[in-house]
Image (spheres, rainbow, N blue to C red):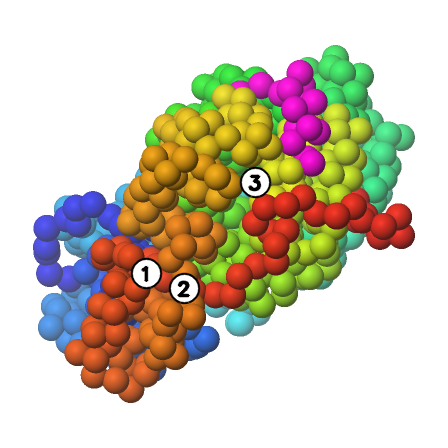
Amino acid sequence: MSERPGVVGELTLAEAEALLERTLGSPVDPASARRLTRLAGYQPEMLVTLAQACRTHGCLERIDGPWQLTEDPVRTALVPLVRARLDTEDPEAVATLFRLALMEPVHPESLEAADARLAARLERAGELRREESGLLVLAVPGTAEALRLLSPVEEQDRVHARAVAHGPLRRGTLRWAAGRGIRVPLPALLVLARESLARHDWASVVDAAEHLEAHEVSQDSVRDRCRLLLMSAYAARFVPDLDVAHAHVDLAEDLLARLDPEEVPEVDAEVRTARADLLHFSDGDLDGALAALDEHAPVATDRSAATVAAHRIMHLVYGGRTRAARERAELDRKVLRRAPRDLRMRVALTETLAIVAEGRPQRALRRTTLTAAQHAPSQGRALWLNEEIRVAYVVAALASDGPAAFPSLARMLADTREDLYRPDLLTFYLARANWLLVEGRVAKAHQLGELALGSSDLVDPSGVGAALVALVAHTAALSGERARAEELCALFGTVPPRSARIIAGGSHAHLAAARLVLGHPHEGSRLRRVAEQFAQEGQYGFAAEVLYAGVRHGARRAAADLRELAGHLDGRLHAMRVAHAEALLAEDPLALLEVSRRLERAGLLLLSAEAAAAATAVPDVPDAVRRRAEARVASFLESEPVAGHALLHRARGTTGRAELTPREREVADLIAEGLTNAEIAARLGLSLRTVEGHIARLYRKTGASRRAPRRAGFVVTQRPADNATGSAPSPAPAATPSPPPAS
């Protein structure tokens, strides 16, 4: 293709989502946004072109609010674009492009001279990109996919036949060979699987294992077959195809009896750990996972026992059994020294999550920093290691000092490319939404959480779905969406927590906050029982999270319980939590304002705004203090971050639904949904000038001076039940069941 300057500044995932929203006028669901962004190669101009083409060709439609892909964008929108461009290119260059697309990722040394010259020119122009591995790929993946669809059949046959004979093998070649009954050598399948795992190309790994059906089992191939089947079982969790995952572990286990005796311990350990991962992380059966690991004992060697011991500790931690995990780690300390280095590092990072649960986030941060310093992020063998470093940092940071102390983490969660989070995108969205919420960006956190919940292809390999449901219930309640919040509160109890048990404190805190805002009777008593259960397990950090959520939203009796945990906890955040609780209990407006300022400096704008709002609600507060508190609440409401917080509007006395006409209420609700003036006009069948008049009157009636960009600015819903805003709930009767925490 024609040369052009290299692309400067690829989009981040967050930037891409924002660009798509500006281009299309409303949000795009996460799955569709990721698909379009990846196809466009993170290039802004290409992304806009692709989004517009998809809308024009009807494969991108608005469904229940966000835009969603309804057809394959490559066949529907990209193929016509690429075909039109090819018509203007030199035929020789077009032939080379076809070959590059069919071969990618391309080993440079495998290129013939003419193709190598064009490849060098395309790389200089920014149309061909060299990966860290040295392999070459087309800079716009969508272009590559379209070229493969447009390639002449005879060219496909020539390229694929050469790849089978001489390598390197690629997924397209594998499928071509399978369709023609051509057997691909097992070593080539293994190379494809390893490279695909490193690139998070799960489907190619599964395809490679399925191709084993063409191979008879021989004694010298058993070990390699086991290895390939287990790689496929791992990858199938993300396709997702759990039936295939279980089937391939079964096949690998059946082969154990045919292994050389010296190979049995290592392979058996791999089979047992793969089985345990499926049972726990996919099926939610922690006890079954631990039992699967125990089955390795009869054949264990020192090294294989170390591998199994490491996995046992990680399963205990992710299963919420932190005390048992710490005890087991102490017992197995000498055994663990024989585990591979990457695995020992994973155990160390997992233990930091247990330390946070116990209430020592600052200690956890130090440990995470030390572990991360020993590991250079890569896409190598330890696929989960990079992910676990990020998770440990985020969890410890949010539990210790607040976002302001970790600007680099905030940027990471806002700007990280999809490919860095590809193993577990749902966890990424959960972390990002949590960060947005503590920063006070209620509306944005709610939007992101809802989009993630509604995405059809966000796989949940870590089992954090329950945690996401609880968070969105909280944001829905804060945004005044009572019916949705109630629906999600009910749903929470039906979603298996799986490995989300290691973040159960946050999950139950979000649930308690939502239920209190909604005015659920006896929620204060229930959450105190949940906190007590956490404390009995030594998970004082979790207990503190739940109790603090209760105190913030009216369950004042939880303040004494929170104070009693002080000796078990470290970090500035806990000190601020206690100060906030004491000020609420004492109904001290000056103390609340001071707490509000401390929380703001820590970047905890949601909590800061709530403390200021509470100061306005104190009875008989001096006028001067009240004015200071009201001015502080007003300043929060004038900023984008906390504009969607319904409780703040009530605190300021700006909800005033009775003051509004029915049409003004309609407009206000649409503003709260994030619609622009033009979108509101189209929705209501009004002129733009009429809508602007309604909004001007809303400004006057609510006291707002402007509408911040894309915020749910006028939340005008019914008032919550009394115990959501102040008084402690009545004690629950003895017969009221108390669901156990997810631990």
First in residue order: circle 2 vs circle 3: 3
Which amino acid does the dot numbered 1 rest on? Thr
Mark 2 residue element: loop
The amino acid marked with disc number 2 is Gly
Residue 506, x across and y down, in percent: 61, 41
Q: Residue 209: give x, y in percent of width and height.
A: 62, 55
Closer to the camera in the image, 425 or 738: 738
Q: Going 44% across and 42% down the picture, which residue do you hit?
A: 616
Image point (43%, 70%), residue name: 658
Q: Earlier in the sequence, mark 1 or mark 3?
A: 3
Determine if residue 342 is in view. Answer: no
- Is the residue marked by circle 1 packed among few (<14), some (14-19), or many (20+) residues within 10 Å? some
User: CA–CA distance between discs 2 and 3?
Assistant: 23 Å
Q: Residue furthest bottom?
A: 685
Q: Position of residue 181 (x, y in %)?
A: 57, 69
| Residue that carries the numbered disc 2 in the rendered image | 656
Q: Is residue 24 left or right of residue 441?
A: left
Q: What residue sits 60% from the left and 32% below the top?
A: 585
The magenta stretch spans which residues? 557-571
Label 1, label 3: how far apart the Cα atoms are: 25 Å
Closest to the observer: 488 or 659?
659
Tell me which corner region of the image, top left, top right, bottom left or bottom right, holds residue 493: bottom right
| Mark 2 nearby-residue class (10 Å; few <14, some 14–19, many ≥20) | some
Residue 2 horizontal side relative to residue 502, left or right: left
Which residue appears at 75% of the width and 29% of the height?
A: 535
Residue under label 1: 702
- Kindly identify which residue carries mark 3: 552
- Looking at the rendered image, the quarter that the N terminus falls into is bottom left
Residue 569 in magenta stretch: yes
Q: Secondary structure at mark 3?
A: helix
Circle 1 — which element? helix
